[in-house]
Image: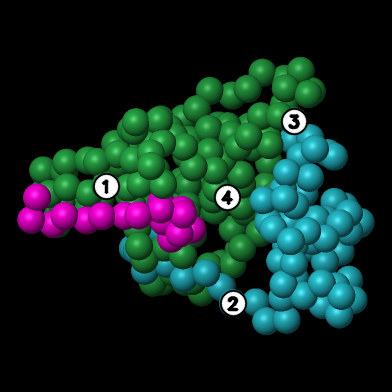
Amino acid sequence: MGQLLDVELRTYEQNRDQLLGTAEGKFALIRHNHVIGIYDSKMDAIAEGYRQFGNVPFLVKQILKVETPLNFMSNLLRI
Amino acid sequence: MPSFTTHVSNLQAIGPVVEQLQIAVGSAVEGALRKAGVSIPSPVLTTAMIDTGATVSVVRQGLPVQLGLNPVGVAHINTPSSTNVACYEYLVRFVFPNNVVVEATVLEAPLQGQHIQCLIGRDVLAHGVFVYIGYGNLFSLSF
């Protein structure tokens, strides 16, 4: 994976505690150093990202205390 | 209920493979491109495997670039050989046979071999009914 969204991931980490206190389980829309908004659904947050910024990288991230990796059983994945 | 049914010559050996799956940019991407006066990339024709062992759907590395997509998220995954690998996430629209359309986010990751370009995971199956008729070498997907 490249470096796209590194700034947005850092912004999430910097705001994580505050977001957990107010919006745990919801979805944050982040662009550069700004938390743009909080949404109930991932698709709503993505749609708003495209509406505001167009086809550019932005981060939609669920606000969770504990993050667990997604599991894949298939050996078709070459990683 | 929109659906399609596929016959596979040896379903047990080959698996539930969708030979004519089109992957297009998501509707929100399309709206943003239209607003910017940019042409909409053509859908990419792929071969996909329905994979009940995949938590979410995956597309082959490089496919998002073909569609002119930018990432909208990052997810970490565990595979049989790796743990906690970060992958970019993109918004796409799956167009299955019979024009069955599902909008979803997908992860970008390298896939083995050249045949399968996409894994349809449980995030897509969560919206539908997947029927696997082993003795008839048939499967169907309805939404």
Chain letter, green in picture: B
- Please indicate, yes or no, whether residue B44 appears anywhere in the rendered image: yes
Could you tell me which residue is drawn at 74 percent across and 30 percent down? B32
Q: Residues within 10 Å of mark 4 (few under 14, many from 20)?
A: many
Chain letter, cyan in picture: A
Q: Chain of mark 4?
A: B
Image quarter where the N terminus of chain B lies is: top left
Task: Look at mark 3 in the image and give the residue it sits on.
Answer: B32
- Amino acid type of disc 1? Ser
Picture coordinates of residue B137 (x, y %)? 12, 49
Q: How many marks?
A: 4
Task: Look at mark 2 in the image and give the residue it sits on.
Answer: A68
**In this picture, residue A39 sits left or right of residue B120:** right
- Disc 1 versus disc 2: distance between alpha carbons? 31 Å
- Amino acid type of disc 4? Thr
Residue nearer the viewer, B62 or B32 = B32
Picture coordinates of residue B112 (x, y %)? 35, 52
First-in-chain label (4 vs 1) = 4
**Residue at mark 3 shares a chain with residue at mark 1:** yes
Are the two marked residues, 1 and 2, in contact with CB atoms closer than 8 angstroms? no
Are the two marked residues, 4 and 1, in contact with CB atoms closer than 8 angstroms? no
Could you tell me which residue is drawn at 82 percent across and 60 percent down? A38
- Disc 4 versus disc 3: distance between alpha carbons? 17 Å
Dividing the picture into quadrants, the one containing residue A77 is: bottom left
- Please indicate, yes or no, whether residue B113 appears anywhere in the rendered image: no
- Disc 3 versus disc 1: distance between alpha carbons? 33 Å
Q: Which mark is residue B140?
A: 1
- Disc 2 versus disc 4: distance between alpha carbons? 18 Å
**In this picture, residue B107 sits left or right of residue B47:** right
Q: Which mark is residue B66?
A: none
